Image (cartoon, rainbow, N blue to C red):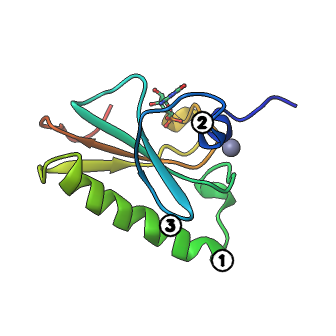
Amino acid sequence: MSKCLFCEIIAGRIPGEMVGQTDSLVAFRDINPQAPVHVLIVPKEHIESMRSLEKKHAPLVGEMALMAQQLAEDVGYGQDYRLVMNTGINAGQSVFHLHMHLLSGRDFTWPPG
Ligand code: 5GP
Ligand code: ZN
């Protein structure tokens, strides 16, 4: 069974540039940033994607949103920001461990690519 990249980063076996942590979440900088601020907010629990969420995960997802709000102030200097959760290969998901992208520090266009 192949190992999960984000589980390895959470366990400290693969380095990650951490910017925040709670009992249930970690946040680290994306290795291939798409904006001056590009942080990944990741549950410590291995959940594959939005598709795997259950009712019991509702507080966890709320915590992800609140951590994004806080990091947007602390790491993103309070600038406007975009939150993204790619779900499935065709939507751009490449790591199958739930995560929220926090992007900030430049202007964004809509619709996204
Ligand atoms: P996804 O494409 O699944 O929405 O997002 C996965 C993100 O993980 C990508 O933006 C990618 O750049 C990032 N990523 C891939 N490998 C690593 C790594 O080893 N370390 C870190 N910090 N980010 C990674
Ligand atoms: Zn994982």
Name the disc covering residue 86, or none.
none
- Which is closer to the viewer, label 2 or label 1? 2
Q: Observer-nearest residue: 14 or 113? A: 14
- The quarter holding residue 103 reads top left
Would you name the residue on which mark 3 appears?
61
Mark 2 lies on a secondary structure that is: helix
Mark 1 lies on a secondary structure that is: helix
| Label 1 CA crowd tier, 10 Å (few <14, some 14–19, many 20+) | few
Q: Amino acid at mark 3?
A: Val
15 shown above or below 21:
above
Quadrant location, the N terminus? top right
Disc 2, disc 1: CB below 8 Å? no
- Report whether 15 appears left or right of 62: right
Badge 2 residue CB within 8 Å of ligand 1: yes
Badge 3 residue CB within 8 Å of ligand 1: no
Q: Earlier in the sequence, mark 3 or mark 1?
A: 1
Q: Which residue, as the protein is rendered here, is positioned at the far right?
A: 1
Q: Amino acid at mark 1?
A: Lys
| Label 3 CA crowd tier, 10 Å (few <14, some 14–19, many 20+) | some
Residue at 55% in and 75% down: 58
| Label 2 CA crowd tier, 10 Å (few <14, some 14–19, many 20+) | some
Would you name the residue on which mark 2 appears?
9
Residue at 61% in and 71% down: 57
Would you name the residue on which mark 1 appears?
56
Mark 3–mark 2 distance (CA, rounded to whole Å): 20 Å
Q: Observer-nearest residue: 39 or 85? A: 39
- Report whether 41 appears left or right of 98: left
